[in-house]
Structure formats: structure tokens, C-alpha cells
Image (spheres, coloured by chain):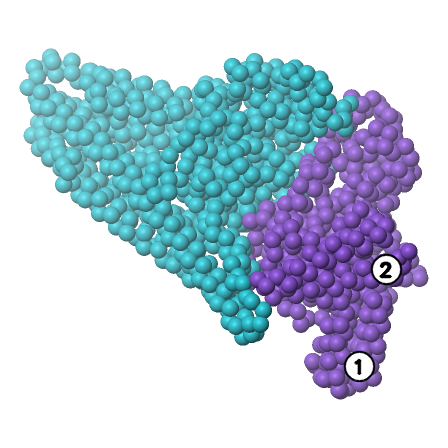
């Protein structure tokens, strides 16, 4: 074996390359050292700098669940109801509803599953991401540390983008970067203290596992879980559907780790604790047991999955190692627990939209039918329908109460949130100044800086949480207004009595779609539109650049008295404190500036989204009530044979509607199996 | 000169003892006197699971300290030279009493009726030469504390110097963390016992083999981390030297048995491909079915003793002919684990200047006794103590080093480094101070010293140099003059 040999440079470097990790000689086509799994560099064939198409690989396939959904999944079921709904809408000439359902279908197909990888410094997060994908996109090193979150997602061709935090708080800029120099952007030596002010790096890879819509975020390990980065990493979990908490087998879970997990699970309950480096520690089974006990005692319900990233990477060339690496269990977890339940949630959300569409169509059918079946009551029905038309007409108008309520709500929210942030930051600053006064910044600055960053990040995150919560409340209030404006109860009681429609339990479906009732999908979208704090990554690092180092000392000529020296020292200390205060204040101001801008943008985005969504619904509803009046009027004029034919036609349609309803119940009735 | 120092200090302590006004004061002074004449006390401090006990065992050359997280590491334990094997429980209240113990691998001490919280310390006396010059104190691991940072860190960085140190020197065990982590300095948790200053602290980057994932180059990777640590200004002020050590490997090196060597040899001589498979993971080494004629039990024993990295490295060393015998392997392991380097650093940093460190501790005791009014004629005693501290150049050197390392003497980097070296920061012998190769001739030393002397003389006399620099330069001049005088006295010219 050539393990200990010095790399022999005499051999032509064209067909052979040496592993910088262990010195092993490798074929040029290898990307990983066949001996130690160390990354050797992208394959030299210029045509494909990215990962070779994984399907060509002879290695064992991943669990099939990741690839194609087997039949009878909620997605397929919901796809069927979508088709049914579209057909029904077309039959009734409701192109607007059909188009709407088409959008829902598209959204369902593209629903992504984001899994965040979090954990302590040097616990092997980047290596885990690499091992999972059997690539080397995330730079991994024994001492280097990731400073910028890296999003790995599907894309063809493979490329990498750096998202920059613009200095004036304007929208972030995306810059294309070469795949092989990602390390210069995300690891510490290339980007110390995140001087480049990146909020994230996005890597798009053509990989089978990612093709299913799975994306992975490798969070920075710098500073550990308790640092500013750790705090900000918590918020990435808000946008993530799944979490992998990484801890290594060298020791059991520590108190800070458990504390972090507890908070993290509140944001992202779909999680697993991944125990890495099992190849290095013979006691890993015992550590896994201890960790399980720790988790149980803390009341945390998540599986412990021991893995060896080293073996998994090596499995590229030695497929028999795959089983030993433990990654099958992890892939299984991702495929079933995460991807599947996220898909189910998406299906349920789509079901709510189909339900809304069905309700619109149902209303039209009901109106027409009640006139046809009970002509005696026609006058009453027409009056109710006209009233409904007026109500929906008001809903569409820009003066609608819900519009006012939305505009006012967001306006108030902006000022509330800004005020909240100011107050939090002012408290942090006051504490910081207290600490500066107590000591000499020359000694304490480094620690103070870390402390300040963490406090500021904590304040920003708390502020963000408040915003998310309150925005949700605004959305709910608007939804309520919307209902009130609609005077729906009146409408329903007028039309519903007819027994042929009583089976269409429109109202009961609402209850199934909690939380958020019929607006569930909308409110979910609100939450996603708010994902702000990525910007904090750009700010969490490299804040001041001001070194409160020893100041320039005045050259003191010999013979100057002790008192002057003492005074000079005092003066210098005061100067250093002043500098530190200014730096702290500057940082806090900048964070506040950026955060305010981000908050405003996010809220405006939310406002626009909610407005569009409600407006679209209002338009659909108005269209329905207009058409209901017309259809009912037309039915009144019909000749008896026409009436009979129309009644039969309507019977078929409401039968289709009932089937649709049953299918929807089947989807929404399913519970998420975790 | 150092012996003079010890003499002067012990004389002063004796004088003070005769003037003691209370029994307590007399006892304190007597204890200080004994301590001055006894071995240097070194504490091993660090976080939980940092590998303290393993390193301690390596230093003791015996597996005494239990390496699993048991009750005993919760209690401060002193290991000192004794004529027989004895363990004494020193309770917080009451008289010390001997404890029952057994040696099942590690020392298993029965605490009897004592609750751990009531025990001040355990004193283990052991007949081993390795404790001749050092008394080693094992401290309980510092648990991870949550994030209240500012005050504590500040306290560590600016220790008040009035306290009487219990130990003369501290060995801090650091684990691999990031500098921006507030837990970076957590290992320096300051308590009454382990109270380090830049003068008497050495950092050990422990479990070094794990940083580089137990690959064969793991120690080089750890070396890089160590260098990064030394560049970290805050850390440099706490302990200027950081040595990466793979404790388990060092211990194995110190205590390697012939049977273990032959088992390793079996592995080294077997088919390399098969051994590559066997050593791929810790699990495989423990229980993979293999043709290699070595039992699972033997393999597991090897892994417990040497760790995965140790076994990998030993096999490689034997295979490549570096270690034909057990003694060679033992030597190689001690060298490659960083343990040799740690020992030489300990020798330079602690043993060589143990007299100064001990004298300093003794004077600190005297100072606190006098301040508390434990002696009559306090003013005269204080004056005498002052005379010793200001008169002994060794003290002056330490003071200057301390000032230099805490950033109070402002000099450009190369000059500061030279000053540190000249003041004995890396070792006390003339060659080390002057940066000469080992064992230089008298002429070489003389020439180098004179050349350096003239350079620093001009620094001291530079009109624009500030007072701190001038004082430091004058101190160095005196050091250099001393070196020249010593050389001339030893080998008169001609």
C-alpha cells in the first residue's frame, strides 16, 4: 500500500492523481480517493464538471420511494379530483375556475421539500450533505468551517449562485460563481467573517435525489449553536419542512445541543437526530443509546440515525459499503417521514382549493336547479340571488371592507414591528454599553463582539417571529371580514334547503382543513412570503471590521512624569471605550436599517399576495353569483321539455360534484404518518 | 542564581514564621516553606470529556485515573510521590483519613461514608519516578455552561493577582472549537485551584487524532489547528504555547506491552488489502470476520488501548520498518502523539523555572499572611519580600514576559518574538534564548550574545522608544550580560 508514501510526482500526472488526504494513487476519473474517500477534485473531463448522471452508476438504488410515487398516494388522488373539477368547470363554461385549478395543479407538482441540516461546529454537517448526495459540493475540511448557508437544490445544468446582501438594504443580488470555487465563498479561509456579505450560496445539481423536489440547506457551523449564526439558523427552520440535527459520536448530546433541539423542533417538527462519524468511534452504539435516553428525558420525539459519511462517500466505488454506512435508514427517513408527509400537506392544501372551486360550481347548479324544480319559489330565489350578486359585487369593489382591513392591518403591522425591533435593539445596545463601561475594550472586544452579534440576532429573530405571528393574525382577520362582507350565511340558508344538495356538505369541509379553514393554503403562502432572516446571515458575520486594538501610542519622551502617563492611559481607555461604543451603535443601526427594509418588503409582499388571492376569490365568487342569476332567469323562461332535459343535465353535474366531494374527503381525511 | 532565590525566600519565610502572631499564620507559612522545597504543583484543567484523565495517566506512566466518567473525576485528586501506595481522603471539615482502594485497571477508590460534596480532595501517593519533580492535580471537568458570557470571560482575561495560587502551573486541555465560539475560552474557567497566567500555563489541544478523522495525517492537521490557536491573540495571552496531543496514543506509547506489540505485528504482516478493510472503521476492527490470525478479543483490546488512529499508525510504522521492536514502536508513538513535545515543553516552561514559580507562590502566601495581620513586624517583612522580587533578575524577566505577552509592551512582531525568546519564554538555556542550534560552543554563545546586546542597547537608548519598551530592553540587556558572564566564567578565554 502506498499509504505513507510521499506523492510520487515522477509519474505523469495525466492519468493519475494523488490524494492529498492519504497519498493514495487514484485514477484520473476518480473524484474521491479510493483509499480514504478524500475528495480529489472534479473529474478532468471538461464536458461534465458536475456529478455524472447518477443513474449510470452501478451502485444500489436509493429507496424507490424517493423516485416515483407509488399509486394511490394523496398526490395522485388529488390530481384526479383536479381533473374532475376542471372537467366540471369546462362543462359549465367556467374557464376562470378551470384556469385556477390548473394553477393549483402546477403548484402541487412543484412543491419543494426543504430539509435543513443543523448542528454544532465540526459535527460533520457539510460532509453529511455531501455523503447524502455522494458529491463534494459542500467544502469539507478538518479545521475549515462553513460561514454561509449553502442551499443544494435540483438544476440542470449544474451551477452555483452567490446571494449577496446589498449594502443599502436593497434587494439581494445573485451572482453566478464557478462550481469548483464554492469553497472561496462558503468556507472561512476564503471568506473570513463572511466579508463578502453573502446571505447564502445556492448550488443547483442534476441529481436523482434532488429531482424529487428535495433541497438541502447546509447551515454554517461557525460559532456553534449558541452564536448569532446558530440563532439565525433557527429561523431557516421556519422555511424548512424537515430538519436533520447533526451530532457526532465522539460524545453524547450536550446541554446546549438539547436546548437548541428543543427550540428547533417547535419550528420544524419533522426531524431526525443524525449521529455522524460512527466509523471512528467504537462506542457509537452506546452513545446512540445515551442520546436516545437524553431525547426521551427531554420529551423530544425524534429518531436517532447513526451514519458514517465516510463509508457512504466511499460507497461510490465500493457499493457493498452502503448498507454499513447507515445511510439507507437516513434516506428512508427522508423519503417516508419528510417527503411523504410534506406531499400530503400539499395535497390537502390543493384539496382546499378544489373544494372552493367545487363550491362555486355547486352554487350555480343549486340556483338553477331550485328554480327548475320549484318554480313556485322562483321569486324568492331570484331575490336571494340578486342580493348575493350585490354582495359579491361589493366584495370585488376596491372599497370592500376586507380591502380596508388588509391595508390598515399591514400598515399598523409595519409600525408595530419597527417599534418592537427598535425597542429590542435599544435594550441590547444599553447592555452592550454597560459592558463596555465595565471593562477595557482592548481585552473584551472580541468576546463583546460575539456577544453583541448573538444578542442582535436574537432580537431580530424574536422580532421576525412576532411579525410572522401578527401577519397571520391580520390574514385571519381579513379572511373573517371577507366572510362577513359576503353575508354567506344568508346565501346558504336560502339555497341550501333543497334536499338534492344537502349531501354537498360545503361547510363541513371547512372544518377538515384546519388550520386556517378554507383559507389554509393562503395562510401557508403568507408564512413562506415572510422568510426574511436569511439577510441576517449577511450581517451576522464580519460586522464591524473595526479592530479595537491597541491605539497608536504617543511617543512619550523620557522624563515625563507619572501623572501624565496615568492621564494618558486614562485618555486612551476612554478613547477605546468611545470607539467600541461607536462600533456597537453602528452595527445595531445597520442591522435595524436592513431589518426594517426587509420587514417592510416582506409585509408588502404579504399584503400583495393576500390581496391578489382574495381578489381572485372575490372575482370567482362574483362571477358565480352573476351567472347564477342569469342561469336561474334563463331556466324560468324555458319550455317544459327543455326544463326536463336541463334538470337531468344538472342531475349529472351534481352527481359529478358529489363524487368530487367524496374524493376530497378521502384526501383531507388522511392523517400525516410520521 | 535560582538556588540563591530559593534560599533567600525560604530564609524570609523562616523569619516570618518566628514572627507569626497566630497558629494559623504559622501553619500557613510552614506549609509554604514545605511547598517551596517540594515538587512543582501542576494542575490539569479542561472541559468534561477533554481527555484529562488519559493525559494524566500518560504523564503518570500508569493507568491510575479512571478514564470513564465516574465519580472520582468529580473530586479534585492530587497525585504525589510516595514511598508506598496510599490514598488519603481529605474532607472539607475534619481530619484526613486513609481510603480503601483497589486497582482494577484504573484506581477504584471507595469513599466510604463520605459524600463527594464533603470531600476537599483525594491525595494519591504513588511510588513512581515520574512524580519526583511534579505533583499533578486532576481537576473536575468544567461542564458546558450556557451563554452568560461577558463577565466571566473578562474575569478570566484579567485575573486579579492578589490571590494565593494553589498550584504553580496549569495545563489547559482545549478541544477543537472555533475562535468565535464563546466557549472557546471556557476551558480557562477560572477557579481557586486552576488559576493560570501567561507565565505558567500551557495549552494542550487534546484528542488531536480525532480532529483529522483518525487519518494517518491526523496529527499534521492537529498541528495546523494548534498553530491557529497560537495566533489567536486572546489565547496567546492565556497560554502562549499550544501543543496538540493524542493522549491515548501517548499513554499507549508510555505503557506499551510486548504482547500488544506482537498483536500489532500480526496485523502489519498480514495481507495489506485485508488490513485496509479491517481498519476501515472502528466497528470492523472490533468484530469483522477475518483470516488474519488474531482474535476479536485481542483486536478490541488493541482498539481500547490505542484507539483506531493508534492501531492504524502502529501498523503503518511496523510495516514500513520504523518500529522493528516494541521499544521502537513505543518511542515512535510517544513522539508522534505529541507527548514527547509536551514533555519537553513542560520541562522548559515549568521544570526549568520551577524555582521561580515556586518562589513566586511562596511569596504570594507570605504576602497574604502579612496582609491579614498574621505577622508582627509586617513592614520589614514586606520590604524584604520586595527586595527579593526586585533583586532577582528571574522575577524581573517574568514580569517583563508577562507584560509583553499581555500586550503592555508594544513592539513590532519580530522584535516581540525575539524579546520573548531572550527573556526565556521558550526555555531557559542560553542557546534557546539566543535562538542558536543546540549545544553551541562558548564562542558562538558569546558572539551571539554580544551582537544581540548591542542591538537591544540601541533600542533602550532610542529617544523615541516609550518607557515600556525601554524597560524591557534594559531587562534583556541584563539577561544577555548574565549569559556573557556565565560563559566567560565557565570557559575563560585562551
Q: Which residue carries the number 2 mark?
A: B488
Q: Residue at x 78, y 76 (%)?
A: B28
A613 is higher (above) or lower (below) than A205: below
Q: Which residue is drawn at 80% across and 59% down?
A: B483
Image x and y of residue B394, in percent = 76, 65
Q: Which residue is drawn at 27% across and 30% down?
A: A356
Image colour assigned to chain B: purple
Mark 1 lies on a secondary structure that is helix
CB under 8 Å between discs 2 and 1: no
**Is residue B182 visible to us here?**
yes
Q: Which of B34 and B494 is in front in this view?
A: B494
Q: Quadrant of the N terminus of chain A?
A: top right
In this rendering, would A501 be left or right of B60? Answer: left
Residue B16, numbered circle? 1
Mark 2 lies on a secondary structure that is helix
Image x and y of residue A171, in percent = 34, 38
Image x and y of residue A458, in percent = 45, 51
Circle 2 chain = B
Amino acid at each position: 500500500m502506498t499509504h505513507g508514501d510521499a506523492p510520487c510526482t515522477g509519474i505523469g500526472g495525466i492519468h493519475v492523481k494523488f490524494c492529498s488526504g492519504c497519498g493514495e494513487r487514484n485514477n484520473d476519473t476518480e473524484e474521491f480517493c479510493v483509499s480514504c474517500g478524500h475528495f480529489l477534485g472534479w473529474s478532468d473531463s471538461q464536458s461534465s464538471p458536475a456529478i455524472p448522471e447518477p443513474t449510470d452508476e452501478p451502485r444500489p438504488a436509493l429507496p424507490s420511494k424517493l423516485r416515483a410515487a407509488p399509486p394511490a398516494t394523496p398526490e395522485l388522488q388529488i390530481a384526479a379530483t383536479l381533473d374532475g373539477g376542471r372537467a366540471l368547470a369546462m362543462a359549465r363554461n367556467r374557464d376562470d375556475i378551470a384556469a385556477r385549478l390548473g394553477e393549483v395543479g402546477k403548484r402541487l407538482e412543484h412543491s419543494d421539500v426543504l430539509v435543513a441540516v443543523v448542528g454544532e461546529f465540526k459535527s460533520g454537517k457539510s460532509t453529511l450533505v455531501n455523503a447524502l448526495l455522494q458529491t463534494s459540493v459542500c467544502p469539507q475540511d478538518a479545521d475549515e468551517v462553513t460561514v454561509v448557508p449553502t442551499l443544494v437544490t435540483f438544476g440542470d445544468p449544474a451551477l452555483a449562485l452567490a446571494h449577496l446582501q446589498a449594502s443599502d438594504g436593497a434587494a439581494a443580488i445573485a451572482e453566478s460563481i464557478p462550481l469548483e470555487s464554492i469553497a472561496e465563498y462558503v468556507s472561512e479561509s476564503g471568506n473570513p467573517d463572511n466579508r463578502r456579505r453573502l446571505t447564502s450560496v445556492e448550488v443547483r445539481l442534476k441529481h436523482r435525489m434532488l429531482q424529487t423536489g428535495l433541497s438541502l440547506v447546509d447551515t454554517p457551523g461557525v460559532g456553534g449553536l449558541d452564536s448569532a449564526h446558530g440563532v439565525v439558523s433557527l429561523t431557516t427552520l421556519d422555511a424548512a419542512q424537515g430538519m436533520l440535527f447533526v451530532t457526532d459520536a465522539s460524545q453524547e448530546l450536550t446541554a446546549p445541543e438539547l436546548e437548541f433541539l428543543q427550540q428547533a423542533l417547535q419550528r420544524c417538527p419533522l426531524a431526525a437526530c443524525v449521529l455522524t462519524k460512527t466509523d471512528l468511534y467504537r462506542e457509537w452504539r452506546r452513545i446512540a443509546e445515551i442520546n436516545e435516553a437524553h431525547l426521551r428525558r427531554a420529551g423530544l420525539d425524534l429518531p436517532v440515525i447513526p451514519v458514517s459519511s465516510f463509508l457512504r462517500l466511499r460507497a461510490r466505488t465500493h457499493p457493498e459499503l452502503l448498507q454499513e454506512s447507515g445511510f439507507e435508514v437516513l434516506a428512508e427517513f427522508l423519503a417516508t417521514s419528510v417527503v411523504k408527509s410534506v406531499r400530503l400537506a400539499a395535497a390537502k392544501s390543493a384539496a382546499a382549493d378544489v373544494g372552493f372551486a367545487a363550491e362555486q360550481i355547486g352554487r350555480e347548479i343549486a340556483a338553477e336547479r331550485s328554480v327548475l324544480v320549484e318554480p313556485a319559489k322562483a321569486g324568492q330565489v331570484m331575490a336571494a340571488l340578486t342580493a348575493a350578486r350585490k354582495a359579491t359585487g361589493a366584495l370585488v369593489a376596491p372599497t370592500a371592507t376586507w380591502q380596508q382591513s388588509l391595508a390598515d392591518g399591514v400598515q399598523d403591522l409595519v409600525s408595530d414591528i419597527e417599534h418592537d425591533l427598535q425597542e429590542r435593539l435599544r435594550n441590547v445596545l444599553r447592555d452592550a454599553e454597560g459592558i463596555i463601561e465595565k471593562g477595557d475594550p482592548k481585552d473584551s472586544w472580541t468576546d463583546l463582539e460575539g456577544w453583541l452579534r448573538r444578542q442582535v440576532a436574537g432580537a431580530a429573530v424574536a422580532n421576525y417571529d412576532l411579525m410572522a405571528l401578527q401577519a397571520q393574525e391580520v390574514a385571519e382577520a381579513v379572511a373573517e371580514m371577507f366572510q362577513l362582507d359576503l353575508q354567506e350565511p344568508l346565501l346558504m340558508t336560502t339555497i341550501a334547503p333543497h334536499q338534492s344538495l344537502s349531501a354537498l356538505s360545503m361547510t363541513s369541509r371547512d372544518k377538515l382543513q384546519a388550520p386556517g379553514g378554507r383559507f389554509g393554503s393562503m395562510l401557508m403562502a403568507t408564512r413562506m412570503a415572510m422568510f426574511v432572516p436569511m439577510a441576517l446571515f449577511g450581517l451576522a458575520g464580519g460586522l464591524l471590521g473595526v479592530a479595537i486594538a491597541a491605539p497608536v501610542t504617543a511617543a512619550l519622551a523620557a522624563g515625563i512624569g507619572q501623572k501624565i502617563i496615568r492621564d494618558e492611559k486614562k485618555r486612551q481607555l476612554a478613547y477605546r471605550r468611545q470607539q467600541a461604543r461607536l462600533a456597537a451603535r453602528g452595527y445595531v443601526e445597520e442591522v435595524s436599517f436592513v431589518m426594517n427594509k426587509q420587514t417592510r418588503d416582506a409585509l408588502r409582499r404579504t399584503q400583495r399576495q393576500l390581496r391578489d388571492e382574495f381578489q381572485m376569490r372575490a372575482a370567482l365568487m362574483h362571477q358565480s353569483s352573476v351567472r347564477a342569476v342569469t342561469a336561474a332567469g334563463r331556466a324560468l323562461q324555458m319550455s317544459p321539455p327543455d326544463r326536463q332535459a336541463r334538470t337531468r343535465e344538472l342531475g349529472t353535474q351534481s352527481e359529478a360534484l358529489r363524487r368530487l366531494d367524496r374524493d376530497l374527503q378521502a384526501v383531507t381525511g388522511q392523517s400525516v404518518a410520521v | 542564581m535560582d538556588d540563591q532565590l530559593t534560599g533567600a525566600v525560604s530564609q524570609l519565610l523562616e523569619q516570618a514564621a518566628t514572627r507569626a502572631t497566630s497558629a494559623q499564620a504559622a501553619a500557613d507559612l510552614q506549609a509554604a516553606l514545605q511547598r517551596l522545597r517540594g515538587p512543582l504543583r501542576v494542575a490539569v484543567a479542561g472541559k468534561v470529556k477533554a481527555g484529562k484523565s488519559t493525559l494524566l495517566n500518560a504523564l503518570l506512566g500508569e493507568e491510575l485515573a479512571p478514564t470513564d466518567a465516574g465519580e472520582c473525576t468529580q473530586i479534585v485528586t492530587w497525585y504525589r510521590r510516595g514511598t508506598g501506595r496510599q490514598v488519603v481522603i481529605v474532607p472539607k471539615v475534619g481530619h484526613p483519613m486513609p481510603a480503601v482502594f483497589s486497582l482494577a485497571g484504573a484506581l477504584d477508590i471507595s469513599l466510604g461514608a463520605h459524600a463527594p460534596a464533603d470531600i476537599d480532595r483525594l491525595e494519591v501517593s504513588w511510588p513512581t519516578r515520574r512524580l519526583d519533580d511534579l505533583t499533578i492535580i486532576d481537576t473536575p471537568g468544567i461542564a458546558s455552561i450556557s451563554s452568560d458570557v461577558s463577565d466571566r470571560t473578562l474575569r478570566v482575561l484579567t485575573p486579579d493577582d492578589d490571590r494565593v495560587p494553589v498550584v504553580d502551573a496549569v495545563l489547559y486541555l482545549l478541544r477543537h472549537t472555533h475562535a468565535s465560539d464563546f466557549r472557546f475560552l471556557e476551558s480557562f474557567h477560572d477557579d481557586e485551584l486552576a488559576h493560570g497566567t501567561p507565565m505558567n500555563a500551557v495549552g494542550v489541544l487534546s484528542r488531536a487524532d480525532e480532529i483529522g478523522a483518525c487519518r494517518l495525517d491526523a496529527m499534521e492537521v492537529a498541528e495546523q489547528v494548534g498553530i491557529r490557536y497560537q495566533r489567536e491573540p486572546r489565547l496567546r495571552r492565556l497560554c502562549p504555547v499550544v501543543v496538540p496531543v493524542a493522549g491515548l496514543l501517548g499513554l499507549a506509547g508510555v505503557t506499551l506491552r510486548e504482547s500488544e506489540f506482537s498483536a500489532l505485528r500480526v496485523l502489519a504482516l498480514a495481507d495489506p488489502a485485508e488490513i485496509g478493510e479491517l481498519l476501515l472503521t472502528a466497528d470492523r476492527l472490533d468484530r469483522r470476520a477475518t483470516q488474519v490470525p488474531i482474535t476479536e478479543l485481542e483486536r478490541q483490546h488493541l482498539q481500547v488501548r490505542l484507539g483506531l488512529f493508534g492501531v492504524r499508525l502502529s501498523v503503518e510504522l511496523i510495516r514500513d520498518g520504523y518500529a522493528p521492536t516494541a521499544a521502537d514502536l513505543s518511542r515512535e508513538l510517544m513522539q508522534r502523539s505529541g507527548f514527547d513535545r509536551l514533555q519537553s515543553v513542560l520541562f522548559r516552561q515549568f521544570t526549568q523555572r520551577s524555582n521561580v514559580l515556586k518562589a513566586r507562590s511562596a511569596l504570594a502566601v507570605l504576602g497574604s499572611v502579612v496582609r491579614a495581620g498574621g505577622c508582627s513586624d509586617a513592614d520589614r517583612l514586606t520590604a524584604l519580600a520586595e527586595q527579593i522580587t526586585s533583586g532577582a533578575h528571574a522575577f524581573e524577566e517574568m514580569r517583563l514576559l508577562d507584560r509583553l505577552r499581555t500586550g503592555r509592551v508594544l513592539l513590532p512582531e519580530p522584535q516581540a518574538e525575539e524579546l520573548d525568546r531572550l527573556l526565556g519564554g521558550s526555555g531557559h538555556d542560553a542557546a534557546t534564548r539566543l535562538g542558536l542550534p543546540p549545544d553551541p560552543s562558548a564562542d558562538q554563545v558569546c558572539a551571539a550574545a554580544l551582537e544581540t546586546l548591542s542591538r537591544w542597547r540601541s533600542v533602550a537608548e532610542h529617544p523615541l522608544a516609550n518607557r515600556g519598551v525601554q524597560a524591557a530592553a534594559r531587562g534583556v540587556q541584563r539577561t544577555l550580560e548574565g549569559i556573557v558572564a556565565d560563559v566567560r566564567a565557565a570557559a575563560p578565554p585562551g
